[in-house]
Amino acid sequence: MIGLAITMAMIQQPLLPVPSPRQLAWHEMEYYAFVHFGPNTFTGVEWGEGREDPKLFNPTSLDCEQWVRTFKEAGMSGVIITAKHHDGFCLWPSKYSNHTVAHSSYRGDVLRELSEACKRHGLKMGVYLSPWDRNHPTYGTPEYNLVFAGMLEEVLTQYGEIFEVWFDGANGEGPNGKRQEYDWDLFVVTVRKHQPNAVIFSDAGPDVRWVGNENGFAAPTNWATIDRKRYVPGTPLYRELTEGTEGAPDWIPAECDVSIRPGWFYHADQDTKVKTVRELMDIWYGSIGQNAALLLNVPPDRRGHIHEIDAARLLEFRKERDRHFGNDLMQHSVGAFELKDGKTETFKVGDSVTVKFDKEVTFNRIRLREAIPFGQRVKRFEVWADVGGSMVKIGEGTTIGYSRILKLPRTSSSFVEVRILDTIQGTALISEMSLYDAPGD
Ligand code: FUL
């Protein structure tokens, strides 16, 4: 990896929209854990009805320290926990509900345990709160909006810094058969007031958007921009969310949420269905490699542990990523980022990002990044290499954004060129380029 954005970028005009400081910090997190935990862990369902006896929630040896240690070793940067899923059960002792840990067989505060473990290990914590609540008696009335804002205030003020607030878009009937009209403005204001650095996720932002599927894949063309006016949470335009929209007015990048198991919650009969390293690598290329973040769900079991199979898989996945991306061949380059005409400050359409080596290197992956503080611009590029004395096209792509990884045929070369073929407004700022030789194809 080499970086040169800063000096060049200083003199650049940003192309609006650009990420906010909280979004920029979020972009760098890249890969973090999702934790679905609650009564469903003990009843075996995915969507609890909210009428479950809270006493069912009974982890026998809850160990958030073990979760966080595992996530850290797995190379994850944070963890988002289902503080409240659709069943309305609160993993903290909320004063707004009788359906909480305080009324369960486990009398502690899961959010406290987790936040302390995160602080000890330097991981960031986020919270998932389902606006849809199948338990709360006020659901379906204006009063529920105040209850939900009050719950938000509790989780955003008692556990230290929160990096992301995840609003689930699923929305059905509540206990009284009514649907809720959500006061989104109130919810957003509440988050901004108590955690101004946290990004807010929903189907449509305002800070981070759903990628439109739960498989872990963004599209090869993936803009960080959408036109927010076209969306309301819960009624997404799936395809558009997967690709973003070129030239749209709002910077709302995609996050890929996917579970390591078929379900979001732990079910013992899925112990044999934990995703393989190969499947996880495909997800990595489809998310991190396609300008999105990866939120990988790893649900704790009834003991309150990350199951041994999942923990081992996460570490194997990390080792495999190291085998793919552990050795950046750019470290051997002798001349990098030399512009064709030697004078231009920026990469214009028709310019090339070029890299020379004093002897051939062999590679089959390229990772590119744009200097996103100045916007996302690249629409089309090609990768060329000198192979045995002639320039050969070895790959092509559309968008780059925060991060784009292309698989290439294994190539040996001492001169590599990324040709910028099309951009918004004719210029591009490429901030990093890496070359790797990954095992296999
Ligand atoms: C969905 C929910 O309905 C699932 O239970 C899960 O929480 C997933 C991440 O989001 O909308």
Image: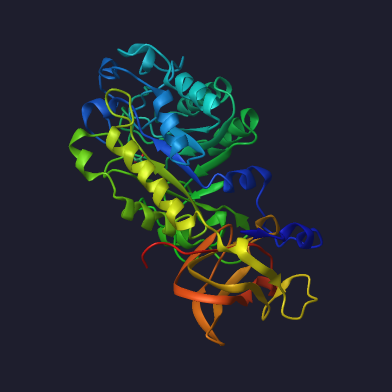
Q: Quadrant of the C terminus?
A: bottom left
Between 83 and 249, the residue placed more toward the observer is 83
- Above or below: residue 392 compared with residue 226: below
- Above or below: residue 379 compared with residue 373: below
Q: Residue at x 30, y 12 (%)?
A: 105
Colour pattern: rainbow
Q: Residue at x 51, y 43 (%)?
A: 201
Between 407 and 323, the residue placed more toward the observer is 323
Drawn side of residue 33 relative to residue 185, left or right: left
Q: Residue at x 64, y 47 (%)?
A: 24
Q: Position of residue 268 (x, y in %)?
A: 20, 33
Drawn side of residue 47 relative to residue 314, left or right: left
Q: Position of residue 36 (x, y in %)?
A: 36, 33
- Above or below: residue 358 compared with residue 48: below
Q: Residue at x 70, y 59 (%)?
A: 374
From this viewpoint, is residue 410 visible?
yes
Q: Determine the residue located farthest toward the left in the rendered image.
A: 269
Between 425 and 95, the residue placed more toward the observer is 425
Q: Which quadrant of the figure shows ligand 1? A: top left
- Above or below: residue 434 compared with residue 122: below
Q: Position of residue 34 (x, y in %)?
A: 41, 38
